[in-house]
Image: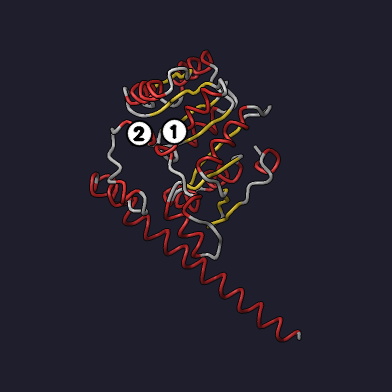
């Protein structure tokens, strides 16, 4: 996979050693459509605070993100972290899948591309497919739940089902980092053109998981709504994880400011 080879003109941002692209939701969908036409398999990944924390600690995960063809920002915290480290990024460059999945389906149908949903508990992907085809009846869509053994005979059967469908775009939603590990391990075996690990998007889209009121999701507070809804499961991710991310970002900001001051001192001395 090579980002620069296929999509060389999309500006990038780097935060804590992870590259991602400055893309609006509409630009992201355009990129996905263009990727279907390429001769090689394309991975379109995403980053939020949870992903950056994983990438900071797991070498393979950081490598997966940095080798993905396109990585978009799916988190207010990442955009804030980028700004705190002096990089230009605005709210339009944060795109969350439940907000644009219907547009993706519409574009797939208009271009006669197929979509396969591999995600969620049994019934969630099926419900999402039903909702999407109700909006876009001509969409060719397949689905399978994400609760299967990710290796061995059961994994082989799921891959065989995907390959019979031959999707142009494969949505994979097992949660981080399991979905990325599955793509890494099965990329060459799966007959799809574009791979998109998108987490719990279908759970939010179908209402299986409550995202929170619109005013919270639009102002970077979706994490707080989810924490209130599932405190036992998510307190480590959001309370500890967000704090750890912010500490790492501020440490990086201090390092960058210190390096800048040292460079200015050397320049004055040289003059």
* Label 2 crowd (10 A; few <14 / some 14-19 / many >=20): many
Residue at which label 1 appears: 101
> What percent of the width, then of the height, locates residue 194?
57, 29
Evaluate whether residue 204 shows in this view.
Answer: yes
Circles 2, 1 touching at the beta carbon (< 8 Å):
yes
Residue extending furthest right?
271
Task: State the quadrant of the N terminus.
Answer: top right
Q: Say which residue appears at 47% left-offset and 17% top-offset.
A: 138
Q: Nearer the viewer, residue 240 or 100?
A: 100
Residue 120 horizontal side relative to residue 39, left or right? left
Q: Say which residue appears at 52% left-offset and 64% top-offset.
A: 85
Give the image quarter of residue 14: bottom right
Q: Relative to residue 201, is residue 248 depicted above or below?
A: below
Name the secondary structure under disc 2: helix
Residue at which label 2 appears: 205
Q: Relative to residue 169, is residue 8 depicted above or below?
A: below
* Label 1 crowd (10 A; few <14 / some 14-19 / many >=20): some
Residue 243 horizontal side relative to residue 184, left or right? left
Give the number of callouts.
2
Q: CA distance from mark 2 to mark 1?
A: 8 Å
Q: Say which residue appears at 33% left-offset and 53% top-offset.
A: 221
Mark toward the start of the polypeptide (2 vs 1): 1
Name the secondary structure under disc 1: helix
Residue 171: image tag = none
> What percent of the width, then of the height, locates residue 211?
30, 42
Q: Say which residue appears at 61% left-offset and 39% top-offset.
A: 69
Evaluate whether residue 148 shows in this view.
Answer: no
Q: Nearer the viewer, residue 87 or 66?
A: 87
Q: Relative to residue 200, is residue 156 depicted above or below?
A: above
> What percent of the width, then of the height, locates residue 197?
48, 35
Residue 65 horizontal side relative to residue 266, left or right? left
């Amino acid at each position: 996979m090579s980002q620069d080879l296929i999509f060389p003109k999309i500006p990038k941002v780097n935060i804590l050693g992870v590259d991602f692209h400055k893309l609006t939701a509409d630009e992201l969908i355009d990129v996905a459509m263009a990727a279907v036409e390429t001769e090689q398999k394309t991975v379109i990944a995403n980053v939020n605070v949870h992903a950056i924390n994983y990438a900071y600690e797991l070498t393979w995960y950081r490598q997966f993100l940095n080798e993905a063809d396109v990585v978009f920002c799916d988190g207010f915290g990442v955009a804030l972290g980028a700004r705190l480290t002096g990089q230009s990024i605005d709210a339009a460059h944060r795109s969350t899948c439940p907000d644009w999945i219907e547009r993706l389906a519409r574009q797939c149908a208009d271009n006669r591309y197929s979509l396969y949903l591999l995600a969620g508990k049994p019934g969630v992907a099926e419900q999402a497919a039903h909702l999407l085809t109700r909006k876009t009846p001509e969409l060719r869509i397949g689905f399978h739940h994400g609760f299967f053994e990710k290796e061995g005979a059961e994994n082989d059967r799921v891959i065989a089902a995907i390959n019979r469908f031959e999707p142009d775009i494969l949505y994979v939603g097992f949660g981080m980092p399991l979905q990325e590990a599955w793509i890494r391990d099965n990329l060459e075996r799966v007959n799809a053109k574009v791979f998109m690990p998108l987490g719990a998007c279908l759970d939010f889209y179908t209402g299986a998981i409550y995202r929170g009121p619109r005013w919270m999701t639009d102002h970077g507070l979706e994490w707080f709504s989810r924490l209130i809804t599932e405190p036992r499961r998510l307190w480590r991710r959001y309370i500890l994880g967000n704090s750890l991310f912010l500490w790492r970002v501020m440490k990086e900001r201090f390092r960058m400011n210190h390096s800048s001051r040292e460079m200015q001192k050397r320049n004055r001395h040289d003059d």
